[in-house]
Image: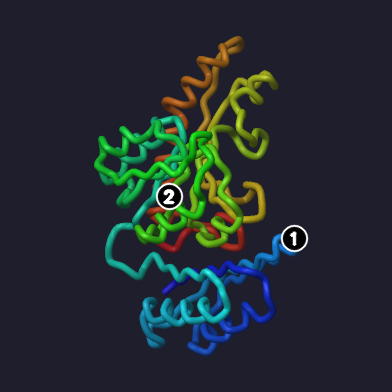
Amino acid sequence: MQVTITAVGPDNCGLADPIVHYVASAGANIHEIQMFDHDRDKIFAMMLRIEWPETSGTVAKLRSHMNEIGQLKGLSIRTWSRDEHIRPPRVAICSTYRPEPVVALLRAMRDKVIKADPVVMIGNRPACRGVAEQFDVEWHDVGDDGGNPNNDQIVELFDQHEVDYIVLARYMRILPPATCWKFAGGRIINLHHGLLPPFPGFRPYEDAHAHHMLTFGATIHFIIPELDAGNQIINQGTFSVAPGTPLEEIKRQGETDNEPSTLVEGVRRVIDRDVELHFQKVVRGQN
């Protein structure tokens, strides 16, 4: 059974050793290991992707041992496996202003196009609260008056609802590296409203229009803690316009049609395990 273990906490000596030693002694095959030391912030982060032998006990037992190590070493440790439970994956959806991607995602889950359950919606603005109520999904507004999110609360909500995947559906805030590490290994999916890599940033429609582009698009990619999206692209959707098409019309087409459909297909690929994230690259899944 494939299991992902993440550990984040204050930097110190010997933090990785007890985790690696335990899983190796239990007969686990370590497929991938990443560690990062934020010298400036004195933060340690680690991600292990292992094959856990059923003869060594359940994932719950492994999680219990990892939590004991976390308490001993002052680490926030999460032990996760898609195969631990016989149920559809549980999804958290984060949003800011635009409702169209969220509506498309919830419709796709309702209609079983995406075989997953939306268990919580989180917004740093209240714009999508009505959508959550329409689809009977628990809603939490984590933003202050300026839209600045309470990132600790976000992590608590992810843990509380035992989410398998997190979808940033036009969530217009950057998740802190510590949050990305806690849910590393291909668990955070982002909708970027432009084509990557040429048009990153918060205004990709405007940037592409300024370059006189006639093809626009959206990108679905895995979020990873330390690198910009490159080899993490899950899906891209494009549309073409005639020369001289006003920017407002381009954005309307992109926001109401292309972004939602591109997001649905990208999330479906992850949920159906058509793709996975190994060594920071998207690979064919083992479904």
Q: Amino acid at mark 1?
A: Arg
Q: Nearer the viewer, mark 1 or mark 2?
A: 1
- Residue 28 in the image: above or below residue 284: below
- How far across and how far down the image is residue 11, in percent? 67, 71
- How far across and how far down the image is residue 222, in percent? 54, 50
- How far across and how far down the image is residue 67, in percent? 46, 77
Q: Residue at x 51, y 36 (%)?
A: 147
Q: Amino acid at mark 2?
A: Arg
Q: Residue at x 66, y 25 (%)?
A: 207
Q: In the shown orientation, is residue 209 left or right of residue 24?
A: right
Residue closer to the observer: 135 or 200: 135
Residue at label 1? 40
Q: Residue at x 25, y 35 (%)?
A: 134
Task: In the rendered structure, find residue 269 and report the number of the disc placed on it.
Answer: 2
Task: In the rendered structure, find residue 105 and report the number of the disc placed on it.
Answer: none
Work out whether mark 1 precedes mark 2 in sequence or the reverse, and give the earlier one.
1
